Image: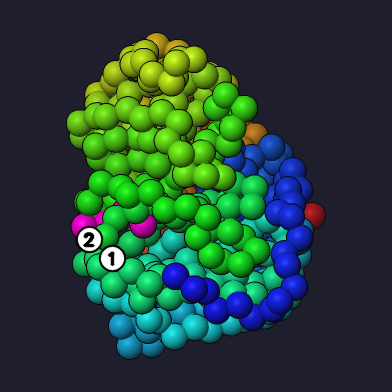
């Protein structure tokens, strides 16, 4: 449990990224909503491509964006034993630095995923990268290694034979790590300055890929961890349990969502919870119309949008009642994101559908990049960043 400390200089306090940045999986606060406007509706391999950068290996992690820089991970070589963290200039796609690590943990996985499955997270000054091998590294924005941990050496009983994929999330000075698996299963709160544990909480032993969500509860920063059997809120600073809800058939892949005082918990059925002052969650509604698959739901202007096996379902967030449903085909691994009143939905075969939202949906375009596309899009700097199997694309209107 002792991290390799590269520098004795303490980290500065975790800072907030700029309002237009996309610092973690599904963007600011994990909401999957951007305030950007004027984004392109149509693109191709050549049309409305500001730049394209080649990646050194596979990955299904999303890019993250902060302070004019883009960070992304990849894995290469035999059985993906080589791990990469890369930084690109957001303006022109120039590679600013690349760092490589040797995998120390198990590299067994499902063919669809990769050792570069968890999305990195940044506070604008530091980048934290977790790999499915359990290798965890912290860098500053210039690529200097600050500390490193081989989590599978710290905890040899971690096991996930199809590949871990849940992403780390920042909560102030705590890095939240979801390490829920079939073996030694737990949640970790890691000190961002040192890489050492601040707290460790046992979790349900089961293969799980849900990325935690951070919110506020009774004046404390709460970290929501979800498995198929529960959703539990921990104090992000101490690991104390603030509240917990047991459930059957909750989602083990998609992340929960927030709207006002409701927590939307994906599952079969999905559940809307309101946590009372006595820390007892109350079920406000349940819905089988919001069936959990791979993609996380997104909440926007009082409505929930979720991907089904063949398209999109739109529900009223207050009641759980379905408003409309639209067919879009199939093959969704990435989560949808919203910007400028439009839903951007990346499909595994390489095309991204753009859907105008309203009382009735309107499909504006299907844009094909002709490469496998499993990573959730990132939106920042007036651009859409798409990570395909081999490239990182910056999609933006050419002026």
Report helix, strand or loop for mark 1.
Answer: loop
Instruction: Examine the image and state in which quarter residue 29 appears.
Output: top right
Is label 2 in a helix, a strand or a loop? loop
Q: Is 44 above or below relative to 206?
A: below
In this picture the colour scheme is rainbow
Tell me the quadrant of the picture where the N terminus can be found. Answer: bottom left
Residue 266 in the magenta stretch? The answer is no
Could you tell me how many numbered marks the image carries? 2
| Label located before the other in sequence (2 or 1) | 1
Q: Is residue 181 magenta?
A: yes
> Disc 1 designates what residue?
158
Circles 2 and 1 in contact, beta carbons < 8 Å = yes
Can residue 130 be seen by looking at this rendering? yes
- Vertical position of residue 87 compared to residue 300: above or below: below
Decide if residue 254 is on the left or right side of residue 385. left
Q: Mark 2 points at which residue?
A: 183
Indicate the position of residue 102 as horizontal and vertical percent values. Answer: 44, 85
Residue 194 picture location, percent across and down: 61, 67
Residue extending farthest right: 399
């Amino acid at each position: 449990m002792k991290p390799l400390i590269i520098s004795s200089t303490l980290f500065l306090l975790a800072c907030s990224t700029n309002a237009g940045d996309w610092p973690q999986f599904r963007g600011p606060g994990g909401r999957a909503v951007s305030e950007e406007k004027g984004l392109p509706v149509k693109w191709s391999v050549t049309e409305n491509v500001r730049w394209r950068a080649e990646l050194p290996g596979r990955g299904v992690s999303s890019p993250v964006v902060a302070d004019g820089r883009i960070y992304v991970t990849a894995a290469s070589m035999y059985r993906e034993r080589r791990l990469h963290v890369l930084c690109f200039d957001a303006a022109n796609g120039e590679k600013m630095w690349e760092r490589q690590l040797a995998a120390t943990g198990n590299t067994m996985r499902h063919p669809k995923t990769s050792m570069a499955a968890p999305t990195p997270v940044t506070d604008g000054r530091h980048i934290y990268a977790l790999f499915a091998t359990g290798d965890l590294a912290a860098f500053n924005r210039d690529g200097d290694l600050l500390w490193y941990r081989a989590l599978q050496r710290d905890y040899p009983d971690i096991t996930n034979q199809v590949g871990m994929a849940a992403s780390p999330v920042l909560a102030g000075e705590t890095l939240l790590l979801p390490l829920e698996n079939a073996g030694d299963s737990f949640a970790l709160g890691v000190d961002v300055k040192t890489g050492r544990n601040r707290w460790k909480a046992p979790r349900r032993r089961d293969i799980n890929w849900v990325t935690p969500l951070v919110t506020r509860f009774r004046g404390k920063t709460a970290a929501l961890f979800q498995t198929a059997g529960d959703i539990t809120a921990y104090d992000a600073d101490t690991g104390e349990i603030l509240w917990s809800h047991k459930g059957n058939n909750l989602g083990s892949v998609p992340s929960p969502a927030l709207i006002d005082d409701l927590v939307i918990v994906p599952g079969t059925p999905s559940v809307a919870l309101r946590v009372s002052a006595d820390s007892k969650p109350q079920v406000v509604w349940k819905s089988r119309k919001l069936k959990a698959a791979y993609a996380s739901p997104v909440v926007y202007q009082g409505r929930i949008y979720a991907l089904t096996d063949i398209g999109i379902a739109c529900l009223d967030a207050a009641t759980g009642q379905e408003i409309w449903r639209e067919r879009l085909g199939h093959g969704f691994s990435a989560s949808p994101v919203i910007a400028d009143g439009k839903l951007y939905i990346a499909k595994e075969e390489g095309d991204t559908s753009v859907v105008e939202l309203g009382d009735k949906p309107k499909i504006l375009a299907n844009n094909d990049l002709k490469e496998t596309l499993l990573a959730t899009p990132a939106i920042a700097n007036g651009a859409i960043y798409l990570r395909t199997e081999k490239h990182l694309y910056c999609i933006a209107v050419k002026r």
